[in-house]
Amino acid sequence: MSTTSGVATGAFARGEPPLDPGRRRKSLHDGSGRRATLLIAPTIVLLAIVILYPVVTAVSQSFTKDAGLDPETGLFVEGGFAGLQNYRLWLLQDCGGGAFSCPPGTLGSQFWTSTGVTFLFTVVAVSLETLLGLVFALVMHRSFKGRAILRASVLVPWAIPTAVTAKLWYFIFAYDGIANKLLGTEILWTGDGFAPKAAIIIADTWKTAPFMALLILAGLQVIDGSVYEASKMDGATAWQRFRYITLPLVRPALMVAVLFRTLDTLRMYDLPKILTGGAGDTSTLSMLVVDQVRSGFNAASALSTLTFLIVFAVAFVFIKFLGANVTEQRAPKTKKAG
Amino acid sequence: MSVLALAVSGVLVVGACGGGDEEAGGSGDAAAAGNSTGPITYVQGKDNSGIVQPAIDKWNAAHPDQKVTLKEQTDQADQQHDDLVQNFQAENADYDVVSVDNIWTSEFAAKGWLQPLTGEYELDQSALLEPTVNAETYNDTLYAAPTTSDGGLLYYRKDLVPTPPTSWEEMMGMCDIATQNGMDCYAGQYAQYEGLTVNVAEAINTAGGSILSEDGKTATLDTPEAKAGLDALVKGFQDGSIPKQATTYQEEQGRQSFQDGKLLFLRNWPYVYSLAKTDGSSTVKDTFGVAPLPGGGDGQPGASSLGGHAAGISVYSDHKKTAFEFLKFLQSEEIQRDWLTQGSAAPVLEALYDDPALVEQFPYLPQLKTSISNAVPRPVTPFYPAVTKAIQDNAFSALSGSKPTDTALADMQAAVQNAIGGK
C-alpha cells in the first residue's frame, strides 16, 4: 500500500541517488508492472481462499434454515431457504411468533443483552487499559536503575495465555478466594448482578494493560528528546509538556493500540467463558456464536455475520473518524524538529 | 488489510465449521454397508484412570486379526463432542466405535451417525440397570451400549446425623444441627453450567415432575410437581439452608467445603468418596457417611440425574461386525469388574453391585445402586444443548433470587418448548 514511498525513502536513507521519477513511471507500465501482479497473485489467491471463501459461505448459510426433525423417523431433515428468518431471530428476537417472541433462556433472547455486555466490556476495559497503559509507559520511559527488570516484569501478565489468566482469576474470585479475603467482603464474583461483569473487566485489564503500555512506549520512544529540552527552555511545566507535546505526538501509536484492543475485546471469548461461564448475563457475542453453533450452523452463520458487521463498523469508525493509522507508516512529523 | 483480517476471524469460525451439514438425515445405505470384520478404532476422551488400554490389550490378545486401536481425545467434554461431530460429518471410517456421553446419544442418532442396535446388531441389555439403557434409547431404538454409569449420592456427617435423612423435608429439618455447629446445611452444584441442570432436574423429578413428555415432544414444566421441585431449592436458598455462595459451586467447591467440615450435607458424585477418605486436607475422613439422595416424602429415594457413557458404532465404519463384538466385550462382566476395581468406574451390570467382595472394597456400592436404579436420564432429545441452556438460565435466575419461581418456571417451559422445535 505504501510500498513505493517506502522504497524511495529506503533508497534515500542508504544514500543511493533517488530514482528518476520519469523512468520509474515508465518502468511501472511495462514489464515490472506485470511481474508485480504475478508476484502478488499467490497472495491474492491465498487471501481469497482463507478470507473470502469462509465469509461468503457463512453469509450464504445464514439464509438457510437449520435442520428440523422429521416427526416420523426422528431424524434431522434439511431446513431449506430461510429468507431473513435467521436475522429476524437475532435482531428482532423473533422465535417464530413475531418480534420479541423468544422466551428468556433461549439464545435468541440474548442477542441484545450480549451486544450490550460486549460493548460494556469494550468501553470500560479499554478505557482502563489505555489509562493504565499510558501510566506504565510513562514510568518505563524514564531512565532509572532496574528499568529493564520493570519492563520485563510488567509484561508477564500479557505473556500468560488467556485461559490460564482466566483460571487464575477464577480462583482469586472464588467465594472463599483471595479477593474476598483481602477486601473482607462476601461478594459472589461469579454469581448474579454486576460483580461478574466487574470480575471480567478487572481480569482483562490486568492482562492487557501491559500490551497497551508496550505499544505506547514504542510511540514515546520515537519522540525526539530535543523537543522536551526546547520546551523546558521556554519554561513549560511538566503538565504542559505532557499535554502539548507527549500526548499529541504519541497519539498515532495510542490510537493503533486502542483500535487493536477494541477489536480484541469485541471478539472476547475465552476469558468470560472460563471465568463466569456466562453467569449473570456475561455472555459475549462470541460466546453466543459458539453456543449457537452447537444447536445449528445456519442461525449461527447469521449471528457471526452480524458480529462481523459490528466489529467492522467499529473498525471503520476508528480509522475514518478517529485517525487510527494502521495502513500507512507515515514518518512522525517531529522527525525534522530540532 | 490486517483490520479486515482481524474483523473477519469471527466469521471464519462458522465458515470453517459449516459445510458438512448436508449430511443431516443420514442414509440407510451407510447403515447397511461395512458389515464385516477387521481392525477397528475405539475413540474416547482422555483415559485419566488408565483403565481403557488394559481392556483393549485383553481384546487384542484374544482377537489378533481384529485389533482395536485406542484414540484418545482431550479431557474436555465439549471438545470431545465437537471432535466427534467433525469426524462424523467427514464420514471418517476410522472412527469405528465412539464413546458418547449419554446426553449426546439422541443428537447423534437423529443426525443418522449411529448404527441402530437392532436386527443383526441387537444387544441383550436385560442384565443392565434399566435407566442406563433408557438414556441410550431414542425414538424407541437403542443407539449405543451403556459402558459406564454414574449417579448422585448424599454425603453426610454421621458424627452429627446418626441416621441419614430419607426425604428432603427430613433433611431440611436437620439444618438446626448445622446451625448449632456453625456450619452450612446443604449444597449441590448450582453454578450456571451443566451441573445446575443435573441438580434442578433431580429436584423436579424427585417431586414427581418431569421436564419433557415421554415422547420428548412437549415440555412439561407447567405442573404443580415441577413447581414444588424448583421451589424446594429456592426455599433452601431463601432460608439459608443452602448457603448463597452455592450459586458459584461446581463439584469441587462443594467437595472442598464438605472436606473442610463446613457442610453438613452434600450432593455429589461417587468420585468424592475416595478423595474424602484419602485427601490429606480432609477433616472428615472418619466422620462422613453415604446415602441415596433424599426423596420426595413418598418413601422412595430421590431421583438422581443419570451420568455415564455408552459406546456407539459409527454408520461409516467398515468393520461393524467387529465393532459389535467389541461392544459386547465392553459390557462383559470381566471388563465391567476391571473398570470398577482399577478406576472406580460405576458399572452398568446390575449384578456387580451385589458382589460382596466388591462391596467390601467400595462400601458405597449399595447406595449407588439405589441411586442409579431410581435415576432419570436428562431430557433425551436431539436439541439437548438448547434445552439445558433454557433450564440453566432460568433456574439460575430463580435460585439467585432475581426471578420468582413461577416466572422462572413459565419462562423455562416456554424456552424448552422453543428449543425442541415448538412455537
Image (cartoon, rainbow, N blue to C red):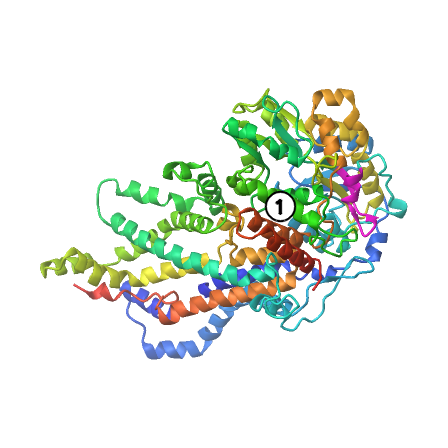
Query: Is residue B124 visible to us here?
Result: yes
Q: Chain of mark 1?
A: B
| Residue placed most toward the observer, B79 or B171 | B171
Q: Which residue is mark 1?
A: B231
* Mark 1 nearby-residue class (10 Å; few <14, some 14–19, many ≥20): many
**How many numbered discs, if any?**
1
In the image, residue B120 lies in the stretch drawn in magenta: no
Q: Secondary structure at mark 1?
A: helix
Residue sitting at 74 percent across and 65 percent down? A78
Measured from the top left, where is residue A312 in percent x and y? 47, 67
Left or right placement of residue A166 versus residue B49 in this view? left
Left or right placement of residue B273 versus residue B102 in this view? left
Which residues are the magenta region? B130-147
Reply above or below: B281 against B197.
above
Reply above or below: A27 against B314.
below
Q: Quadrant of the C terminus of chain B?
A: bottom right
* Quarter-of-image position of residue A59: bottom right
Measured from the top left, where is residue A306 in percent x and y? 54, 66
| Residue placed most toward the observer, B211 or B179 | B179
Residue sitting at 70 percent across and 52 percent down? B223
Reply above or below: A62 against B342.
below
Task: Please name the amino acid that badge 1 sits on.
Answer: Asp
